[in-house]
Image (spheres, rainbow, N blue to C red):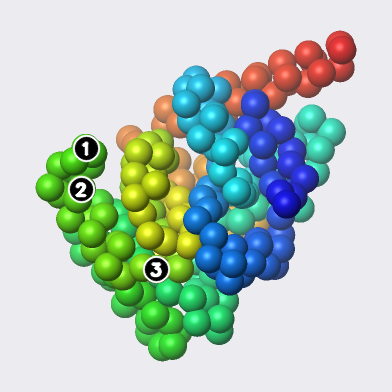
Amino acid sequence: MRSPTVEILGVRVNPLTVGELHDRLACLIDGHAHAQVLHVNVHGLNLAADNPWLRDFFNQAEIVFCDGAGVMLGARLLGQHIPERITYADWMWQLGEFAAQRGFTFYFLGASPGVAQAAAERMRARFPQLNIVGVRDGYFHKQAGHPDNEAVLADINGARPNILILGLGMPLQEQWLRDNWERIDADVALTGGAVFDYLSGNLQRAPTWMTANGLEWLGRLAIEPGRLWRRYVVGNPVFLARVLKQRLISSSR
């Protein structure tokens, strides 16, 4: 049975703590489920508002968890509550420890050549018992039926991971998962955006005082202004306006 959700811009978000998410993952894996566990942030909710296919993809997933202070703020403005944000830069280390203790296996797919491998090596160094059964970068032809795509699917299915972690960026990772999920032999798929860049140390994080006070977006903007200015400078006000519109419509009913 699915847990209660908070609806933000048409997307149902599960208000989970890290402990609750781990419990849900354990149940799915122990039950040999075939489940998608997706993350959503302000950027993802804006994309879903503009792309009905993405909104529908989020809403068919077993779990959609909050990966951003902006999503928590949106929920609060709508009179709802999300207990915490679960951001991959922090959570992956917790997930690695959890998986090592439970004997769950990982497969890493995504990022530039060498980055996911470096991420795997850092995880293994911290958790020697962690079993990462496969690593592939995200630079392959992703069209269904293309030999590159078929080779990636064959490699994943040969490894049969408990947890497939995708780091292809949003919405490419969601589109690839939507197009290939029925042919993937994994208990759970997680979408992780820049997860391998953070794990490998390839991408710098914002200062702790920013991440602890809901300002990680500002730190990321300072680190990668050319890539992220539109997402934050334009996207954040658009998101706020959309949430306030949803609040107004809800209050008028």
Q: Which of 234 and 242 is in front in this view?
A: 242
What's the residue type where badge 1 is placed?
Gln
Asked if marks 1 and 2 touch (Cβ < 8 Å), the reply is yes
What's the residue type where badge 3 is placed?
Pro
Report the residue marked by disc 3: 161
**170 versus 49 height, above or below:** below
Q: Does residue 223 appear anywhere in the picture? A: no
Report the residue marked by disc 1: 143
Q: Nearer the viewer, residue 164 or 194?
A: 164
Please name the residue shown 36% across and 68% down the image: 160
**137 versus 11 height, above or below:** below
Residue 48: where, in percent of width, then height? 52, 28
Q: Tag 2, which secondary structure?
A: helix
Q: Tag 1, which secondary structure?
A: loop
Q: Nearer the viewer, residue 197 or 232?
A: 197
For mark 3, does the 10 Å Cα neighbourhood hold few (<14), some (14 to 19), or many (20 or more) residues?
A: many
Identify the disc placed on residue 149: 2
Left or right: residue 149 compared with residue 161: left
Left or right: residue 195 compared with residue 15: left
Q: Distance between the residues labelled 2 and 3?
A: 18 Å
Q: How far apart are marks 1 and 3 (CA)?
A: 22 Å
Q: Earlier in the sequence, mark 2 or mark 3?
A: 2
Q: Quadrant of the C terminus?
A: top right
**202 versus 85 height, above or below:** below
Q: Does residue 175 appear anywhere in the picture? A: yes
Residue 171: where, in percent of width, then height? 40, 36
For mark 2, does the 10 Å Cα neighbourhood hold few (<14), some (14 to 19), or many (20 or more) residues?
A: some
Q: How far apart are marks 1 and 2 (CA)?
A: 7 Å
The extreme bottom residue here reads: 128
